[in-house]
Image: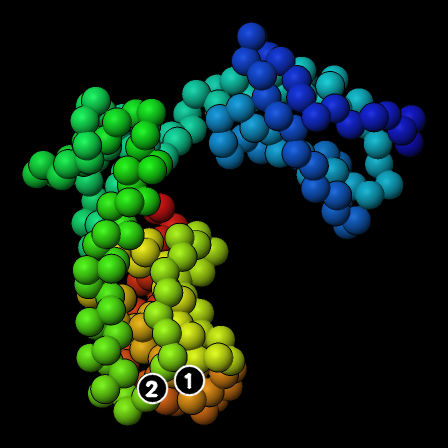
Amino acid sequence: MFKKLSKPKKIILDNIEFSIHYTVRKNMKRMLLRVQNRGEIKISLPKQLFLNVNGFILEHKSWILEQHLLVVMPFDRGSSFYFKAQRYTVQHHNAPLSLIDENIFLHPKRAKKQSDEFYKKEAKAYLPQRVEQLKEEMDLEFNGLRFYCSTRKWGSCNSKRVITLSPYMMKLNDEMIDYIIVHELAHLKHLNHSKEFYAFVEDFVPEYRRIQKEINLLSSAF
C-alpha cells in the first residue's frame, strides 16, 4: 500500500498547463487516466489506494501530450458543426457567421456566441409553429414555450404545463425534432415515462424507438 499523498489540481508538461480532475471508484484496483479535452487530465483511482499522482502522470507524459494534440475542440478550424443533421466544416474569418456550401465560417474569438445565437434564431423561427401544429394533432394545450441552451437534454415539460426546448435541437433533422416535440407534449397527459406515456407517443410517432436510436447515434458526434 502506498503512502497517502495530496492530489494536485494542476501540472505543467512541456510548458502546457493541465488541470487534473479526479473520480474515486471503490471497485478499482489501479489508477487510470484519460485526456478528453485539451489541457485536461481525468484520473480515476481506487478509494483505498493512494499513489504518487505526479509520478504517475510523468510516467505517461508522452502519451498525454500526444492525446492532447489529437483532441479536436468545438469550433477549431476543421471541426464539425451540425445543422438539420447536415455536417458543416468549421472555418474561421473575422466576420459574422455564414454558411457557404459545406462550410460554416465563424469568428475564432466569438465562435461559441455566434453558434448559440444561430441556433436560437433558427429554433425561434421554426419550433413554435411546429409545436402548435403537433399539439393540435395531439389535442393538447400547454401554458408556455421557452428556450434554453441545454446540452444535457433536448427538452422538458413541467407540472405547470410549460415546455422548454433546447435550441440545439436544430442540429437534428425534422423527423428527430418532431419526435422530441411529441415526447414533451405527451408529458402534458402523462408526466412520467410509464407504459401509457410511450403508448401515447407511439400513436403519433410509430417509429419513435428507431428515431431515438438515430438521435443518440448522431448526437454522439456533437
In x, y percent, where is residue 175? 22, 69
Which quarter of the picture shows residue 180? bottom left
Is residue 74 or residue 27 the one in the foreground? 74
Is residue 140 or residue 176 the one in the foreground? 140
**Which type of secondary structure does the marked residue at label 1 adopt?**
loop
Residue 141 - label: 2
> What residue occupies the far left of the structure in this picture?
101
Please tell me which residue is depicted at 18% across the width and 26% down the height of the picture: 95
Q: Which residue is mark 1?
A: 188
Which quarter of the picture shows residue 49? top right
**Would residue 106 be seen by someone viewing this image from the given angle?**
yes
Please tell me which residue is depicted at 24% across the width and 59% down the height of the picture: 124
Q: CA distance from mark 1 to mark 2?
A: 8 Å
Determine whether label 1 and label 2 are within 8 Å by CB.
Answer: yes
Residue type beneath disc 1: Leu
In x, y percent, where is residue 108? 30, 25
The local crowd at label 2, few if under 14, some if 14 to 19, many if 20 or more residues have their Cα within 10 Å, is some
Residue 14 - label: none
Colouring method of the image? rainbow
In x, y percent, where is residue 59? 67, 17
Give the mark, 1 or 2, whose residue is nearer the N terminus. Answer: 2
